[in-house]
Every structure is written in C-alpha cells, then in structure tokens.
Image (spheres, rainbow, N blue to C red):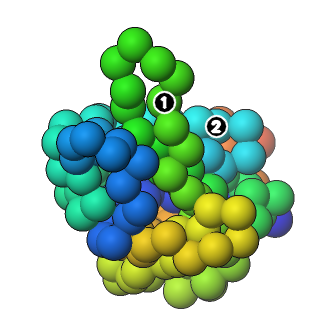
Amino acid sequence: MVHGTLEVLLIGAKGLENTDYLCNMDPYAILKCRSQEQRSSIASGKGSDPEWNESFVFTVSDRATDLVIKLMDSDSGTADDFVGEATIPLEAVYTEGSIPPTAYNVVKDEHYCGAIKVGLSFAPEDVRGRGLPEDVGGWKQSH
C-alpha cells in the first residue's frame, strides 16, 4: 500500500472560457484529493490565462487514484461561476516519483475549454516503522 506526501505545483491555465462577459474573470482553483480540499488564491483580472505558481501538499494513500482541479470564477455579489475541471491520474507519480509540469485538459459538460499546467511530486513514507524508535524490542538492549 502506498502512503506519502503528494506535492502539487499549480502553475497556471491557458485558453479558459471567460465566464464574465463585461470584464476579465477572476479565476481560482479548488484542488481535491479524496476528502482533502485546498484552494488557490484568486488571480484577479487575469481572465482566460491565469498564473498562480502555488504549491499544495496532500497526504495520500494509493486509494487516492486521481486529483481533481476545479476552476472557478470569483464573482462578488453572486455565486462563483464554474469554469471547468481537470482530472489528473496519480498512478504515474506514485511509480515515477515526479511528473514535470504538464498541461491537462480542462473540461466543462464534456467539452474542452482550456488547459491547466500542473507539476506533481510524490514522497513515499515507510509505514512499517511508523512511530517506533529503532531500538525498541531489538537486540541492542539484550547484552
């Protein structure tokens, strides 16, 4: 079973569909890995090509099969608009250890609506020795 830390580098997005008709949208991202959810800052006025360059850390096990990044447009006074989402499979980062920044399709209602650039790295944790000092119950004390 895989346990460890997943670091997500949210770089930016390109070609997003602008949900604000009168001005540039203010996009932000919600990153979700199983029950853990984190949110990026708002790229105010950045419209269809926002940049964040923010890192997020998740504690994961191999039951976490993918990372979902939901892109939203922050609107003051009304509910935030859903821009689209990207689902990123995690199996490759578990085996490779890291995935360089890669563009993933952003989809809304099964239609392509832009791309998001994300880098991933995974640091495994040795679960077997968790919480036990090295010399407990070992031969070191039996002289």
Q: Residues within 10 Å of mark 1 (few under 14, many from 20)?
A: some
Q: Residues within 10 Å of mark 2 (few under 14, many from 20)?
A: few
Q: In percent of the image, x 33 and y 45: which residue is there?
A: 21
Question: Are the residues tagged 1 and 2 within 8 Å (C-beta)?
Answer: no
Residue identifier under label 1: 80
Q: In percent of the image, x 41 and y 80: which residue is there?
A: 103
Residue identifier under label 2: 36
Q: Secondary structure at mark 2?
A: strand
Image quarter hosting the N terminus:
bottom right
Of the residues shown, which amino acid type is indicated by label 2?
Gln
Q: Secondary structure at mark 1?
A: loop
* Residue furthest left as drawn: 45
1 or 2: mark nearer the eye: 1
Q: In percent of the image, x 61 and y 84: which residue is there?
A: 92
Q: In percent of the image, x 29 and y 60: which residue is there?
A: 48
Real-space CA distance between mark 1 and mark 2, rounded to the nearest whole angstrom: 21 Å
Please state the horizontal and vertical placement of residue 105, each as a whole percent of the image.
52, 77
Of the residues shown, which amino acid type is indicated by label 1?
Asp
Image position of 79 (left or right of 130): left
Image position of 39 (left or right of 76): right
Q: Is residue 78 visible?
A: yes
Please state the horizontal and vertical placement of residue 14, each as a whole percent of the image.
31, 71
Q: Name the foreground residue: 142 vs 61.
A: 61
Residue 120 placement: quadrant: bottom left
Q: Name the foreground residue: 16 vs 128.
A: 16
Please state the horizontal and vertical placement of residue 33, each as a whole percent of the image.
65, 49
